[in-house]
Amino acid sequence: MQTDPNQSEMPITRRALLAAPAVLAPSHTLATARPAAGMDAIIAMDAVDLAAAIRRRDLSAREVMTAHLKQIDTLNPRFNAIVSRASSEALLRVADDCDREAAAGRFRGALHGFPHAVKDTAPARGLRFTQGTPLLRDNYPAADSLVVSRMRAAGAVFIGKTNVPEFALGSHSFNPLFGVTRNAWNPAVSAGGSSGGAAVALALRMVPLADGSDFGGSLRNPAGWNNIFGYRPSFGRVPSVPSSDVFGQTFAVSGPMARRVRDVAFLLSIQAGADSRSPFSLKEDPARFAGSLDREWKGRRIGWLGNLQGALATEPGVLDTCKKALSAFRTIGMEVEEARLSLSAEEMWRTAVTLRHWSVGADLIGYYSDPAKRRLMKPEAIWEVEGYLKLTGRQVAEASEGRTRIYQAFRDLFDRYDFLILPTAQVFPFDVAQHWPRSIAGREMDSYHRWMEVTLPATMAGLPVLAAPAGFGGARQLPIGIQIIGPNHADLAVLQVGHAYERASPWIAQTLPEALRG
């Protein structure tokens, strides 16, 4: 487990942990930010440090659970990040079990006693699994997905689910079952999605870690919009099982989200690893992600892709905010210059839309085929299925060839650059009552996810991507992020450079949402 070189090596006592409030300075990026107020020391802790404190028994699982449940009780009614919550009494009983085991020298794993809310697109035994749709209102799965089972085996205590858009479609977390999740920085605007509940729960210190999943930016956009980190691993790093199609569905992946890059890597070390049910799962030892992330980057090169030579409609302020963030890479000795993909944005978009229809439509066709169930599906879900029904075999084959061209275009750039950078979204968080942006900078959006087009090239190429905070901008000074994109399977390198970027950007850790500042 990595230690922070800026922190003392001496153990922190329980009394010191509970008595000393964590006071963080306001960000220089927010001119109107007020001085930070004291915050509960337990919920302020980084996940790596929290795990170490539990292991040393400086903190009990009951203390950790109590602190996080209190935070949920205080803020969740306003922000609606966590849904289908288990009772406090039941959760505290599990925490007490964890403490009895710890007293006997037995620990369940690296997440022993950690309160954790599972994204509501992943089945977790004993918790309602709705995917945000009335069609699954009373669905209780009999078994965990692989990523959930690994977190459970590591000792996580599941407190509930994190809110998502219906069927995880769209990057705005609202649904007819639980309502809308509000942004941690401004409850009047969107939290993003589909991992919106996860991002807000993290930013507001309701949980120490979160799991997400990602196809069209589902953990990258909410991370960027809530000033946290979200990681989309290389395909196969975190196997997607069980699945009805382990060969064709290579778009959506599960991954970790956290407030610090070392915490992202820590959770990845638990989620990752080969599984025989997944033929493309990677066999590298996931423990390597729990080690040191320190590395020298002097002389290495960053390629800034911007808005793909003007092809992507982008809200004023997004590119400027992201470009300012690139100075952190220069601080650590890297070279940054403009880069250009050889493929047109429109060709990449056509490929992505076809393959998304094929993937999403195949998942939802069973609901659509029943007229009574179809009436309960949101328009965007119906649009995906009807696009799927119109596809020909030739179109799917051509799109698959197009995806290969996207991968090769990125591969060509990685001959020149070590990493590539794009924004995490083309707009700042929009009004919470709006379903999706209908236009950007005067350009009409022709689908519910066109405004997230910026995330799809890396998805199509199957590359590892870390979403990192870039700063605050636009008329309302709202958060936006950058995507740090690495070569195929270079997951550790992406996390290492993200760690260096974070260390060169101290404002990220120093900035707190208004709801945490008193």
Image (spheres, grey):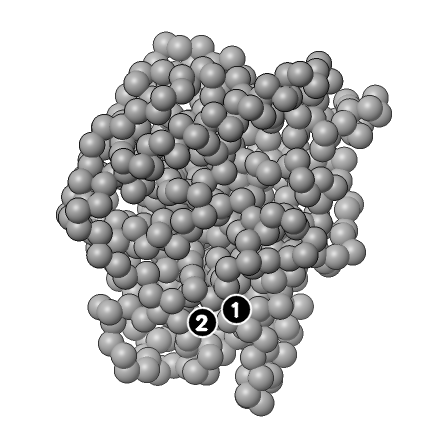
Q: Against 290, is 133 above or below?
A: above
Nearest the viewer among 316 and 106 is: 106
Nearest the viewer among 30 and 222 is: 222
| Res 333 visible | yes
Q: Which residue is mark 2?
A: 51
Q: Position of residue 338 (x, y in %)?
A: 23, 28
Nearest the viewer among 241 and 317 is: 241
Q: Earlier in the sequence, mark 2 or mark 1?
A: 2
Mark 2 vs 1: CB contact within 8 A: yes
Q: Against 148, is 324 above or below?
A: above
Task: Label 1: state its secondary structure.
Answer: loop
Which circle marks residue 111 in the picture?
1
Q: Position of residue 399 (x, y in %)?
A: 58, 21
Residue 153: quarter of image: bottom right
| Residue at 78% in and 56% down | 142
**How far apart are the two marked residues, 2 and 1, measured between alpha carbons?**
6 Å
Question: What's under tag 2, amino acid-wise?
Answer: Ala
Q: Would residue 441 appear left or right of 85 to someone viewing this image?
A: left
Label 2 Cα neighbours within 10 Å, binned few <14 / some 14-19 / many ≥20: many
Question: How many callouts does the rendering have?
Answer: 2
Q: Position of residue 297 (x, y in %)?
A: 22, 52
Specify the quadrant that holds the N terminus: bottom left
Question: What's under tag 1, amino acid-wise?
Answer: Leu
Q: Against 507, is 63 above or below?
A: below
| Residue at 60% in and 48% down | 280
Q: Would residue 469 appear left or right of 159 to someone viewing this image?
A: left
Residue at the limit of the structure toward the bottom, as seen here = 104
Which circle marks residue 41 in the picture?
none
| Res 180 visible | no
